[in-house]
Image (spheres, rainbow, N blue to C red):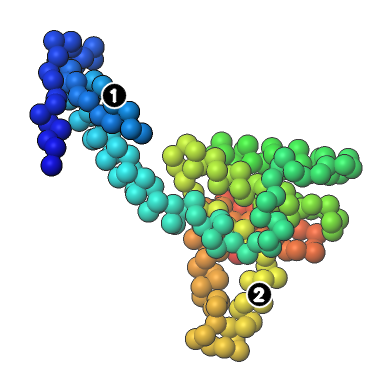
Amino acid sequence: MENHLDKITVLDELCEKHGTPLWQFPYTSQGQEHISKMCQVCTQEQIAMTGQEILEEARNRQRYVTTYDVLMRDSTVPEELRGATFENFKAETAEEKQLLEFARGQVKKYTQGMTGNTLITGQTGIGKSHLSFAMAKTINEHYKDIGKPKSVLFVSLTEIIKQIKNGWNYGKGASLTEFDAVKQLTSVDFLILDDLGAKNHYITRRCVAWI
């Protein structure tokens, strides 16, 4: 077996960063011979940095389980609503434009530290569910981007009640018990209660009551 260490040459040329001698060695890529230079200290730093990045990624993934991942994992969101954003919201009427501006404004306040509830009202079909989920996604991404991930949950009251009622019939085989529902709704940082087909939508931060 060929010993590549025998082909390493220590040069008089120094690393601009560390002032240590550079190493030169040949290597083959796609059948072509090449010559490369490297600083041993730089290489060690890069290896250490890569290891640190992997460790940090693992730590983030662990944190995301109870924060950032909650929205898309635990929310009761219809498939057609999962792609909802402010950008693809069709604001054609004056009421829709006003609602969009209001939703954006509330997100800005929440991401600046505002606490308390937001009530979105309007006629059926005006896009309240779309904007509510867009708010949830924007808040979720904001806190992830600044390195302070939060738990954001979007739930349909209709679906939650349906699952609880099923629990009364199936007992231990229920997908969601009353206890689990209350715990889920009161343990998140941001809660969006969406009553599909109704006139009201609630958004709350650090809710103290199940609205």
Q: Residues within 10 Å of mark 1 (few under 14, many from 20)?
A: few
Percent coordinates x, y for residue 131 in the rendering: 72, 49
Of labels 2 and 1, earlier in sequence is: 1
State left or right for residue 48 relative to residue 184: left
Q: Name the residue that disc number 1 marks.
A: 34
Name which residue type carries label 1. His
In depth, the one of 185 and 138 nearer the eye is 138
**149 left or right of 47 in image:** right
Quarter of the figure with residue 123:
bottom right
Q: Residue furthest right?
A: 93
SS of the residue under disc 2: helix
**Residue 136 location in percent, x, y?**
62, 50
Question: In the image, residue 94 lies at what x, y percent?
Answer: 88, 40
Q: CA distance from mark 2 to mark 1?
A: 67 Å
Front tag of 2 and 1:
1
Residue pictured at 61% horizontal, 43% vertical = 138
Q: Is residue 46 left or right of residue 95?
A: left
| Residue where numbered disc 2 is placed | 161
For residue 116, say whether it is visible. Answer: no
Quadrant of image for the C terminus: bottom right
- Residue at image position (13%, 20%) is 9
The location of residue 189, given as percent across then percent down, is 52, 53
Q: Quadrant of the N terminus?
A: top left
